Amino acid sequence: MNLPHAEVETPVFMPVGTQATVKGMPQHLLEEMDARIILGNTYHLYLRPGVERIRELGGLHKFMSWNRAMLTDSGGFQVFSLNDLRKVSEQGVEFRSHLDGSTHFLSPENSIAAQIHLGADIIMAFDECTEHPATHERARSSMEMTLRWLKRSKDAFEAKKSEVPWTIGSDQFAGKTQSLFGIVQGGMHADLRRESAKRTVDLDFPGYAIGGLSVGESRELTREMIEVVLEHLPKDKPRYVMGVGYPEEIVEYAALGVDMMDCVIPTRAARHGLLLTSEGRMNIKNAKYAGDQNPPDPNCSCWVCRRYTRAYLRHLSMTGEPLGGLLNTAHNLSLPRHNEACTLFY
């Protein structure tokens, strides 16, 4: 993918930087890992510090000192996860902030406007994330809503795409703009997934995401829905599965033809002392590692595994030292690139 801020080779796993930070990881270490693209989240940045503040500061790249590519989620998934704090209508979603209870409204139009002003290289259309389980009737209604919102998102993007902060007065980015991706929904119903994919492709986006997964369904059902949708998405455009990220899933879905994946699991697990290794999940807090002089993962060549022992990482986790979270996170994010078991990924 030739994006304004970077060339990104796929398949790619994208670290999640929800609030303009990949938790526990400074930007220079992400660069050393050769992370070409990371995520930001419109919902969280909209609430704090605010889209206008970030725009005034030159956009999200400049704000967080990240000169490579970025993708922003529309905020739809976060809004729909609020349950009792939201009210959905044809126009959009009224919701109350999880921070202070204040009332806000997100629609396809203002979600797109917010993402344009944040300035990510790839932005996502506003969709309704269908809950699981959902009846066929409910999933169809949600899918139809999403398709109408995709059309409105695209219209809003075409009207405002010249307002990207980093394009203003910049010769470097002259003529370069963002890419808006469409999102396929349809719940866990194969016929609706096929229909959603075909009708989303008819809207002609430069890339396509498969949304509404990892919402409580079995892994077997996740794979089934991915395979169903991939049959109907063009192979010459990026295909993005949202919200998956265990190492074995990355390898599995890349082999199916998925180009892009993201998930908070590697960073969230790391903060709780859970390491993802070629030998399975490792709870580094277990007492059996107190005197273990082996590297966290003997099959991994990341800088954490080359230098530190299981005993030391356990000590850091047990004492609550912030360095422990950083080292665990660095290993988990490095795993697909530096693990012999994941060579298929690259």
Image (tube, rainbow, N blue to C red):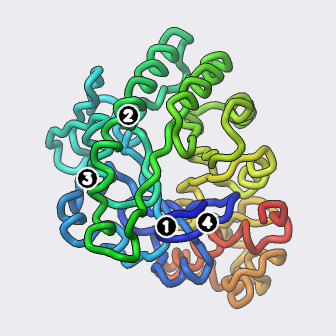
Q: Earlier in the sequence, mark 2 or mark 4?
A: 4
Disc 3 on helix, strand or loop? Answer: helix
> Which residue is outermost to the left?
102
Q: CA distance from mark 2 to mark 1?
A: 27 Å
Q: Residues within 10 Å of mark 4 (few under 14, many from 20)?
A: some
Q: CA distance from mark 4 to mark 3?
A: 27 Å
Disc 1 on helix, strand or loop? Answer: strand
Q: CA distance from mark 1 to mark 3?
A: 20 Å
Q: CA distance from mark 1 to mark 4?
A: 8 Å
Q: Tell me if label 3 and label 2 are in contact, CB under 8 Å.
A: no
Please name the amino acid that badge 1 sits on: Ala
> Which residue is tagged 3?
46
Q: Tell me if label 1 and label 4 are in contact, CB under 8 Å.
A: yes
Q: Tell me if label 1 and label 3 are in contact, CB under 8 Å.
A: no
Choose between 129 and 303: the one closer to the eye: 129
Q: Residue at x 32, y 74 (%)?
A: 170
Q: Residue at x 32, y 44 (%)?
A: 112
Q: 185 above or below 237?
A: above
Residue 1 visible in this rendered orientation of the protein: yes
Location of the N terminus (image quadrant): bottom right
Q: Residue at x 37, y 78 (%)?
A: 65
Q: Earlier in the sequence, mark 2 or mark 1?
A: 1
> Which residue is tagged 1?
69
Q: CA distance from mark 2 to mark 4?
A: 30 Å
Tag of residue 8: 4
Please name the amino acid that badge 3 sits on: Tyr
Tag of residue 161: none
Q: Residues within 10 Å of mark 3 (few under 14, many from 20)?
A: many
Q: Give x and y (percent) for residue 102.
A: 14, 43
Please name the amino acid that badge 4 sits on: Val
